[in-house]
Amino acid sequence: METILKTKNISLTDAMRLYVEEKIVDRVEKVAGKQHASDMVLAVEVGRSTRHHRKGAVWEAKATIQWSKELLRAETAGESFQEVVDFLEEELIREVKKSKGKEHAQERRGARRAKKNATIAKVAQFRRKGRVREEGK
């Protein structure tokens, strides 16, 4: 997985970078799976909304995952850096699971359709209740 980490109105420390990698990058790779994670591009932007405000939801985080033909996006705001990253992680995991669920459902739908189209004639089907008797003829 290719990871792009940007900041806004702050300087990124090593502790912040490690926290983002542990909470978001590793977790998204785990949920997406190894084969899907190799195709992903994860862009995370973390920062303060303004330089002069001290209280309230001054931290914001945005993340975008470009995955094959899909674009998954999440945004959060909060009072601390850790809180924002945790909320962003939850949002991204939810989006990835939803996307994987849609993909899996589409595969199963196609398999059901193929099975329905490839029916076997009634006389060639296997009967589980034993042989068919033609009594009374």
Image: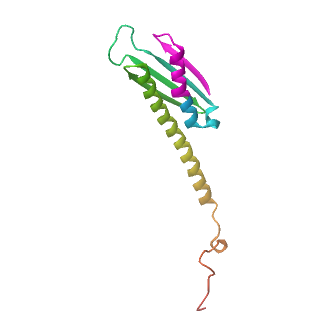
As drawn, the residue found furthest toward the front would be 15
Residue 110 shows in this picture: yes
Residue at figure coordinates x 47%, y 10% from the top left? 10
Residue 70 shows in this picture: no
Residue at figure coordinates x 49%, y 31% from the top left? 92
Image position, residue 106 (x, y; %): 56, 46
Q: Is residue 117 above or below residue 24?
A: below
Residue at figure coordinates x 49%, y 28% from the top left? 73
Looking at the rendered image, the quarter that the C terminus falls into is bottom right
As drawn, the residue found furthest toward the right would be 124
Q: Quadrant of residue 51?
A: top left
On whether residue 23 falls in the magenta region, the answer is yes
Q: Quadrant of residue 100?
A: top right
Q: Is residue 124 above or below residue 22?
A: below
Image position, residue 89 (x, y; %): 47, 29
On whether residue 4 falls in the magenta region, the answer is yes
The structure's colour scheme is: rainbow
Residue at figure coordinates x 59%, y 60% from the top left? 116
Q: Is residue 38 above or below residue 11?
A: below
Image position, residue 83 (x, y; %): 41, 24
Image position, residue 97 (x, y; %): 51, 39
Q: Quadrant of residue 113?
A: bottom right
Q: Which residues are magenta?
A: 1-25
Q: Name the side, left or right, on which 84 lies relative to 2.
A: left
| Number of numbered markers | 0
As drawn, the residue found furthest toward the top would be 52
Looking at the rendered image, the quarter that the N terminus falls into is top right
Towards the viewer: 23 or 89: 23
Towards the viewer: 15 or 76: 15
As drawn, the residue found furthest toward the left would be 55
